[in-house]
Image: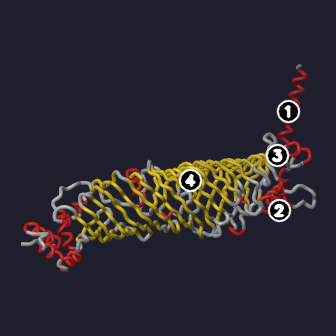
């Protein structure tokens, strides 16, 4: 037994010596030209590999200082650089016949630069072109071409992905901690993959599915189907939206993304937090959920939103339409149909839209309906259409008191800290130049009907010409007398936060010059004390009292 143990110990010792000595006996650097040539042929790009070392125990060859050349159309900087490349190999063929059979490839700490040019072509589109051609034509020597390369496992660990625009001064977007695993890889068949990454400014992405075969003409059009989960993505920092558009916020996405190489489809649920839709806006305090189906034409860089159900609490709207990439911007042609949405669900979204209510006021109750067209470049959108507010209340805003001298014509109604709105409607146009409100109609039961039109500048300055058909007191007679039954003219100036109501002196004087007031008084419609009160009221508007 002791002799057997001694023999066993000697055999083990010999094996250990062989394992230690083999890396020195096999010059793995002699494979470097073949590795570089095969990799270059497979990718269609020049591949450079540093020093090679062999580990018998792990059955792997490690190469340092890896680089893959850029497509010349995108510059001279490397497309990929990596600290090291670990290649799993079959040991026996390597020992017996010095044949390198690859089982696994791991790229460690790579930096990968993805660039898109003005024609919306990616710098990785040309990857693998030459290898695919080689696969489709028999080799003259009869040996298998690199286009038939298959690897049991491909991995990228702790990578950095830099995404930007070619020949642009814009700052690129950086994705850290990128990890990719591909199983049973072959450029000529479908293969499973899994990718995780940290997003710029926080957040994470998890994408898994199947891809392939690699498109022979444009690798960016390789078919795939994947499940996508994105958490806390900063919309601007991630590069999906031009910062000039004013659109910002955090987004979550849970759904599927599929492509046949020509058409892609995204189906799922988008959840937005702290959203902002205007350069003058501020982050919203409500969550927006969008259940969507989006079809994208990869050849024309255009798409269609077939379903866009927008939920803000109990408020529901429907967004449909098209978008297209033109140059470096997205151009939209969409429609938002929003019927009878509860106002209190929307009130918290107004700051995100850049809408400022009078200081200290708040909308409560009622419904808002709108049918809006959304067109133009995403950083210069024009939004048009009718908007209607029904049975609501502007709490903390006394319109009667704000009307100032005009309220005299409505008698001495009790002050009310809130303004009840039976109806508010207008045809709106919102653009970078400001907001236009045409055919404005406001019905306030305690005051009357106010009509008119005007504008709101991008800074919030008001310029409205209005007409008030006031109710109560002497308004019926005096209002008709001053402007021929059309109401009392006034303007609204100041800002959205602090509006100023100013009587239209020219309009009032015009009514007097026409003799309407005298006719009304002569016919007995206004007489005695009421007539004196009316003249005093008018004098107050003009800045003087009757003595």
Quadrant into which the C terminus falls: bottom left
- Report x, y in % for residue 455: 36, 70
Q: Residue at x 60, y 54 (%)?
A: 175
Q: Disc 4 vs disc 3: which is toward the camera?
A: 4
Q: Tell me which numbered mark, 2 or 3, is placed earlier along the sequence.
A: 3
Q: Which residue is mark 3?
A: 89
Query: Label 3's element?
Result: strand
Q: Which residue is mark 4?
A: 292
Residue 438 as seen in the image, left or right of residue 483: right
> Do the residues under discs 1 and 3 have CB atoms within 8 angstroms?
no
Query: Label 2's element?
Result: helix
Q: CA distance from mark 4 to mark 3?
A: 46 Å
Q: Tell me which numbered mark, 1 or 2, is placed earlier along the sequence.
A: 1
Task: Judge the density around disc 2: few (<14), some (14-19), many (≥20) Cα neighbours within 10 Å.
Answer: some
Q: Disc 1 vs disc 4: which is toward the camera?
A: 4
Q: 85 and 53: which one is in front?
A: 85
Quadrant in the rendering for residue 453: bottom left
Query: Label 1's element?
Result: helix
Q: Tell me which numbered mark, 1 or 4, is placed earlier along the sequence.
A: 1
Q: Is residue 202 visible?
A: no
Q: Which residue is mark 1?
A: 13
User: Residue extending furthest right?
Assistant: 141
Q: CA distance from mark 1 to mark 2?
A: 50 Å
Q: CA distance from mark 4 to mark 2?
A: 39 Å
Q: Which residue is mark 2?
A: 133
């Amino acid at each position: 037994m002791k002799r057997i143990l001694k023999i066993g110990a000697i055999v083990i010792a010999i094996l250990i010596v062989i394992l230690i000595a083999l890396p020195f006996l096999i010059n793995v650097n002699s494979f470097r030209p073949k590795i570089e040539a095969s990799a270059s042929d497979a990718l269609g790009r020049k591949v450079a590999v540093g020093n090679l070392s062999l580990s018998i125990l792990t059955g792997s060859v490690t190469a340092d200082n890896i680089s893959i050349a850029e497509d010349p159309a995108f510059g001279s900087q490397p497309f990929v650089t990596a600290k090291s490349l670990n290649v799993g190999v079959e040991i026996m063929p390597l020992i017996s016949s010095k044949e390198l059979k690859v089982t696994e490839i791991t790229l460690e700490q790579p930096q990968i630069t993805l660039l898109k040019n003005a024609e919306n072509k990616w710098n990785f589109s040309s990857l693998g072109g030459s290898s695919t051609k080689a696969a489709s034509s028999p080799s003259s020597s009869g040996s298998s071409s690199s286009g038939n390369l298959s690897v049991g496992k491909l991995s990228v660990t702790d990578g950095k992905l830099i995404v930007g625009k070619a020949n642009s001064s814009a700052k690129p977007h950086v994705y850290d901690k990128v990890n990719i695993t591909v199983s049973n890889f072959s450029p000529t068949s479908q293969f499973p993959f899994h990718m995780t990454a940290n997003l710029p400014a926080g957040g994470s992405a998890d994408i898994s599915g199947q891809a392939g075969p690699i498109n022979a003409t444009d690798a960016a059009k390789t078919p795939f189907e994947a499940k996508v989960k994105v958490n806390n993505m900063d919309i601007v920092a991630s590069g999906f939206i031009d910062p000039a558009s004013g659109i910002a916020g955090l987004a979550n996405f849970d759904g599927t993304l599929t492509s046949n190489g020509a058409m892609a489809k995204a189906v799922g649920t988008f959840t937005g937090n702290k959203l902002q839709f205007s350069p003058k806006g501020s982050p919203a305090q409500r969550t927006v959920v969008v259940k969507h189906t989006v079809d994208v034409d990869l050849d024309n860089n255009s798409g269609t939103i077939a379903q866009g159900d927008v939920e803000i609490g109990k408020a529901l709207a429907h967004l449909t339409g098209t978008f297209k990439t033109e140059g470096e911007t997205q151009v939209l042609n969409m429609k938002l149909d929003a019927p009878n949405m509860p106002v209190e669900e929307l009130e918290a979204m107004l700051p995100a839209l850049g809408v400022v209510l009078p200081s200290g006021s708040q909308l409560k109750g009622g419904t808002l309906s709108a049918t809006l067209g959304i067109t133009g470049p995403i950083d210069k959108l024009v939004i048009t259409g009718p908007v209607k507010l029904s049975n609501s209340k502007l709490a903390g805003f006394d319109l009667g008191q704000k009307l100032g001298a005009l309220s005299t014509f409505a008698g001495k109604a009790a002050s009310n800290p809130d303004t009840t709105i039976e109806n508010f409607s207008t045809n709106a146009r919102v653009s970078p130049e400001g907001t236009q409100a045409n055919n404005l109609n406001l019905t306030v039961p305690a005051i009357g009907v106010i009509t008119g039109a005007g504008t709101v500048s991008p800074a919030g300055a008001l310029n409205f010409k209005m007409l008030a058909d006031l109710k109560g007191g002497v308004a019926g007679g005096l209002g008709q007398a001053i402007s021929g039954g059309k109401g009392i003219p006034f303007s609204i100036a100041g800002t959205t936060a602090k509006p100023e109501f100013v009587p239209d002196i020219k309009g009032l004087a015009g009514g007097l010059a026409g003799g309407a007031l005298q006719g009304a008084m002569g016919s007995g419609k206004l007489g005695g004390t009421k007539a004196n009160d009316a003249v005093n009221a008018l004098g107050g508007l003009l800045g003087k009292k009757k003595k």
